[in-house]
């Protein structure tokens, strides 16, 4: 049975809504609770890490629960709807923290954030798992996957670009009030987008004996496939660099550039920087990579992009140390290099992971794409948890003082704090990317020629 355009649109809109919610939580929880509410950055980072590790471990369990679900609405849609409604309420509570003393606020944040992760998993796992259940056409499945990933990127970009200005507008420069109102708006949008998905998309009949994957099976499959292992390690290092940067860049624009230029200018500059960066990332994936691919192998492009990202971080640090930290036009140059390289690296790691599936099948005779790709989500969550914990420790170590007085005047940070902030958001990512490059060059063997050789061997084996 074919998949209608109306269903494709509903699925894409659902991806936009759910990734707006994820991006708001992933990018701004640290800033909200540390800078605005005044909690220790190390404590916030610790809770974020614990919650994300728990969330990663919870993914396979949710997959088992969904696989065993039987209802008139299908196996997946009931969880998408119920998880959405619960998560929307928790999201609002996350950014509408009551006036509590420090201990009470710490307890409140710990409980609410862990609940947020649990309820988001309730709808996220069935959202992506429902593709085979809504169409049995292979082209439709591929199309639906592309639509979902692309629209998820749109949702993420909307939050990245629009949050700071929206919060300032909604709160009349009171960030605490602005986040409360903005969180409510995003929660409502989230519910509306997933309601559309729920009522438009209909699940087809599927096999109730759906195969599920345990955490033990995931790790065993990964460790038995050395090329998948290398790819996953590089994904962890690249994503850790990205998460550290995304969590620290708002502090840089507010306290480094913002104090130098004036209290309100940092919001516009931060929005412009992210807008240009997001456009560069999309440009890298859709235009630059296809052009490079005509002349270079994927492994050469991968190494080139890692070096480009390192160059971008190095240039950013150099500009700051030379006194150009408030020059937006100059800062856009390293920003474009880092974002564009990251976009291409995202495409390539997915390709390498796919190639590692063929490699594993040739080695063991078993094809385990579902296990390997589930492992990608698992380790990315772990990486984000560790990265945000390191971010929290770093903010406390450099002595950054947040604007907890809810005033318009930006607190002046010491020069040592600003220098520490610049080093944190550049040196640590550089170290991670250099490690990824070294490991990749020494251990990764799936170049274009090797991939073609494996494909030929698998074809001969299957025909034989």
Image (cartoon, rainbow, N blue to C red):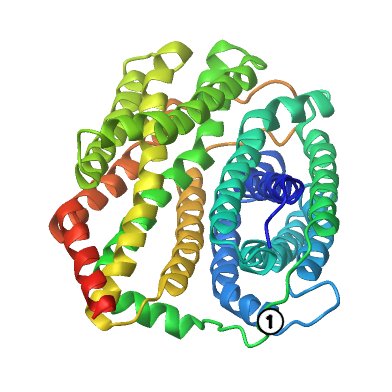
Q: Is residue 200 visible?
A: yes
Q: Is residue 412 visible?
A: no
Residue 123 lies in what quarter of the image?
Answer: bottom right
Instruction: Please tell me which residue lies in front, 173 or 164.
Output: 164
Q: Which residue shows up at 57% across the image and 20% down it?
A: 272
204 relative to 233 in the view: left or right: right
Residue 333 lies in what quarter of the image?
Answer: top left
Q: Which residue shows up at 52% across the image and 81% down it?
A: 213
In the rendered image, the quadrant that contains the N terminus is: bottom right
Instruction: Please tell me which residue lies in front, 447 or 164.
Output: 447
Q: Which residue shows up at 65% across the image and 50% down it?
A: 22
- Is 231 placed above or below 336 here? below
- Is 371 placed above or below 399 here? below
Q: Position of residue 277 (x, y in %)?
A: 48, 27
Q: Give the residue pinned by disc 1.
A: 65
Instruction: Please tell me which residue lies in front, 162 or 62.
Output: 62
Q: Position of residue 91 (x, y in %)?
A: 77, 53
Q: Residues within 10 Å of mark 1 (few under 14, many from 20)?
A: some
Q: Position of residue 287 (x, y in %)?
A: 40, 29
Instruction: Please tell me which residue lies in front, 445 or 239.
Output: 445
């Amino acid at each position: 049975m074919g998949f209608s355009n109306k269903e494709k649109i509903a699925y894409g809109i659902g991806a936009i809504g759910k990734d707006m919610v994820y991006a708001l939580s992933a990018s701004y929880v640290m800033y909200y609770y540390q800078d605005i509410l005044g909690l220790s950055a190390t404590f916030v980072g610790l809770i974020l890490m614990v919650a994300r590790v728990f969330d990663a471990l919870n993914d396979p369990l949710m997959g088992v629960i969904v696989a065993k679900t039987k209802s008139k609405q299908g196996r997946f849609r009931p969880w998408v709807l119920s998880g959405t409604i619960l998560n929307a309420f928790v999201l609002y509570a996350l950014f509408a923290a009551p006036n509590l003393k420090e201990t009470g606020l710490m307890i409140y944040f710990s409980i609410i954030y862990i609940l947020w992760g649990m309820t988001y998993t309730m709808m996220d796992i069935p959202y992506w798992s429902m593709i085979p259940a809504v169409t049995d056409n292979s082209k439709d499945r591929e199309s639906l996957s592309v639509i979902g990933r692309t629209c998820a990127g749109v949702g993420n970009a909307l939050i990245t670009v629009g949050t700071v200005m929206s919060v300032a507008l909604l709160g009349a420069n009171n960030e605490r009030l602005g986040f409360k109102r903005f969180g409510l708006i995003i929660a409502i949008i989230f519910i509306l987008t997933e309601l559309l998905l729920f009522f438009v998309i209909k699940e087809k009949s599927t096999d109730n004996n759906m195969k599920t994957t345990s955490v033990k099976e995931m790790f065993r499959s990964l460790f038995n496939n050395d090329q998948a292992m290398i790819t996953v390690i590089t994904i962890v290092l690249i994503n850790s660099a990205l998460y550290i940067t995304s969590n620290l860049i708002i502090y840089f624009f507010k306290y480094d550039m913002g104090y130098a230029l004036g209290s309100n200018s940092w919001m516009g500059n931060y929005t412009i920087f992210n807008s240009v960066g997001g456009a560069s990332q999309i440009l890298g994936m859709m235009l630059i990579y296809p052009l490079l691919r005509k002349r270079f192998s994927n492994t050469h492009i991968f190494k080139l992009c890692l070096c480009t990202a390192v160059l971008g971080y190095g240039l950013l640090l150099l500009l700051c140390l030379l006194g150009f930290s408030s020059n937006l036009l100059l800062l856009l140059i390293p920003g474009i290099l880092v974002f564009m390289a990251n976009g291409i690296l995202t495409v390539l790691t997915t390709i390498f992971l796919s190639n590692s599936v063929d490699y594993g099948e040739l080695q063991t005779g078993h094809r385990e794409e579902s296990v390997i790709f589930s492992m990608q989500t698992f380790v990315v969550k772990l990486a984000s948890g560790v990265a945000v914990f390191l971010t929290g420790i770093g903010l406390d170590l450099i002595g950054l003082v947040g604007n907890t007085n809810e005033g318009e005047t930006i607190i002046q940070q010491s020069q040592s704090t600003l220098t520490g902030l610049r080093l944190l958001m550049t040196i640590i990512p550089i170290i991670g990317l250099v490690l990824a490059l070294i490991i990749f060059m020494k251990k990764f063997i799936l170049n274009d020629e090797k991939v073609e050789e494996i494909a030929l061997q698998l074809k001969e084996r299957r025909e034989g």
